[in-house]
Amino acid sequence: MKSLLLFFALFTFSISIYGQEYVNGSIVTKHYDTISNVKIQKMSDAKSLLHITYIDEKGNEQRPEIETIKCYTRGEDVYCRIYSAGDMIFAKQVVQGEKVNLFERAVNGSKIYYVEKVFDELIKVPTSKNKFSKVLSSFLADATQIATKIKSKELNDIHEIVSLYNKG
């Protein structure tokens, strides 16, 4: 009976390893070295911010420390290190625009957004509705129509705001 149980445990473990999905991607290290043509393990967004596992060109599984990675792509997804409140953190790039980028982090079941003016300042998007309108209208004040709509709470969807700002 014990050998049968051991067999099923080993069988289940081996299937879970082979069942893991890997997607084509590339990695840029903190020293701006690029590792191309790798297979990166598909994980949830929350786990993707904490660690990375990939298979190199020789077929070896690699698990670099996440602190050594500047950014990486996995299929269509892009994960980048951003500077927020004095810390370097990983975030998923949701929108890459000509004027602003939108990043998100899945933390404890909720999403936190960051808006970055391209090659400029980055802010954390407040979750409180009053702070949201005040902070974003001020941050995007150079687009007066959008800023006015944010301040009057006519615009309150961060994805729509970023899209409108990039079009304008």
Image: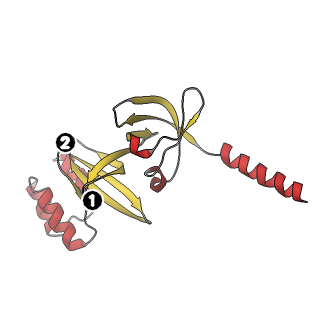
Q: Which residue is at 10% across, 58% downward?
A: 145
Q: For this rendering, which residue is in front, 122 or 64? A: 64
In the image, taking residue 40 as reference, residue 15 lies left or right, namely right
Viewport quadrant of the N terminus: bottom right
Q: Which residue is mark 2?
A: 119
Q: Which residue is at 33% across, 46% downward?
A: 81
Q: For this rendering, which residue is in front, 42 or 13? A: 13
Q: Which amino acid, mark 2? A: Phe
In the image, taking residue 55 as reference, residue 114 lies left or right, namely left
Q: Which amino acid, mark 1? A: Ile
Report whether residue 159 is seen: no
Residue 135, picture quadrant:
bottom left
Q: Tell me the tag on residue 158.
A: 1
Residue lying furthest top in this view?
58
Q: Which residue is at 54% across, 31% downward?
A: 56
Q: For this rendering, which residue is in front, 67 or 92? A: 67
On the image, the x and y values in percent for residue 64 come to 48, 40
On the image, the x and y values in percent for residue 138 come to 12, 61
Q: Looking at the picture, does residue 20 appear above or below residue 155?
A: above
Q: CA distance from mark 2 to mark 1?
A: 20 Å
